[in-house]
Image (cartoon, rainbow, N blue to C red):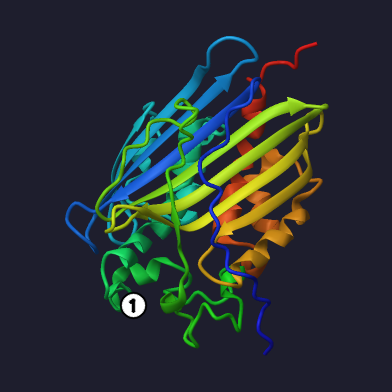
Amino acid sequence: MSAPQQFPPACHSAGHAPLRRPGSIRRTTSIDSEWPEGAGKAWQLTGRARDLLTPFTGNPVVLEEASFRILASPVREILEIASAPEHPGVPALVGVRGAGASRSRIEEQLGDLKGHPLYQLLDDYAGASLVATWIWSRWAPDWAERSLSSPLRSTAGRGGNMLNVCAGFAPGSSSIFPDGSPNTEIQLSTEVGRLENPDDPLGWHDMPVQSGPQKRRARRTDLWREGGLIHIDAGFQDSGSTPDGGRRAVHEYRVYAEIDEATGRLITIQALPLVLPYLECPGASVQVARLVGQPVSTFRSTVLEALPSTLGCTHLNDVLRSLADVPHLVKQLPAEPD
């Protein structure tokens, strides 16, 4: 069996967000995780989201905001949930575990919210809850040993077997042991700073300073019109606080795309793997061209069809799936000035 291609370590964060462009909309979301009772216990996830219009002239305008609070079991079942705005379908998510099942239930119960920030937040619960416990690797020296015997092991891959889950876990990868369990001993992470740009205090929704073992999944999507196309600049990061008072990231991507506004189809796309845990992981980024020509409105499903298993990256796929909300946001973009 030949080993998959390895790449130079992806360990260079893009840093804080770029300045907002006049005539643009910026969606930012974050999901914060914390464990009041310690590792292996039920934990709290707080989701926040905001759509901000930056007009060509005048002051920025908040178009829409959303939030949730979730109490999750150690195996990622939703024990309690509250959202703002409220929605009659939200209580039906109690008892659902974060995975494909949670996304199916969200679509079934809250499909009328597609395109809105609350839907994006809830859809992202599956991925955010999957990665959240990684932060304990920075705080507990025996985290790797404990994770193998923890019930959390069964929530990733197939009962803890990660083989063929994504590009980073292709057969022969350095990232997995013969039994399919992840090789956490060589897992990479990178020191990062705050995402907020000091020259743009309104560039992100409010994100509290984290301390103790706390994890954050953060997204930013900028879109604007130019030359008859919709331009996208999207950032994504999984990071958390560390005992020395800093932050480390385990995943970070930057995605640039152009969409034909008339047809809603993807014209060009580039995915930059900035921070990833294994040397095989960046291989997924070269596969994103498979999406060119597809309507972005269907990306929540077509991304998984075009980039399954070792062709994709679980977290890059999450970034790409979120582009399905672009048509909703485009409706609120100002027209280009004459």
Question: From this viewpoint, which residue is outermost toward the left?
Answer: 37
- Identify the residue shown where x is 64% and y is 70%: 310
Left or right of residue 185, residue 277 in this image? right
- Identify the residue shown where x is 49% and y is 81%: 180
Q: Amino acid at mark 1?
A: Leu
Residue 276: x %, y % from top left: 54, 63
- Identify the residue shown where x is 47% and y is 68%: 188
Q: Quadrant of the N terminus?
A: bottom right
Kind of element beneath mark 1:
helix
Q: Quadrant of the C terminus?
A: top right
Q: Image quarter for residue 330?
A: top right
Vertical order, 264 against 63 (above or below): below
Disc 1: CA contacts within 10 A as few (<14), some (14-19) or many (>=20): some
Vertical order, 94 against 29 (above or below): below
Left or right of residue 186, residue 153 in this image? left
Q: Which residue is mark 1?
A: 148
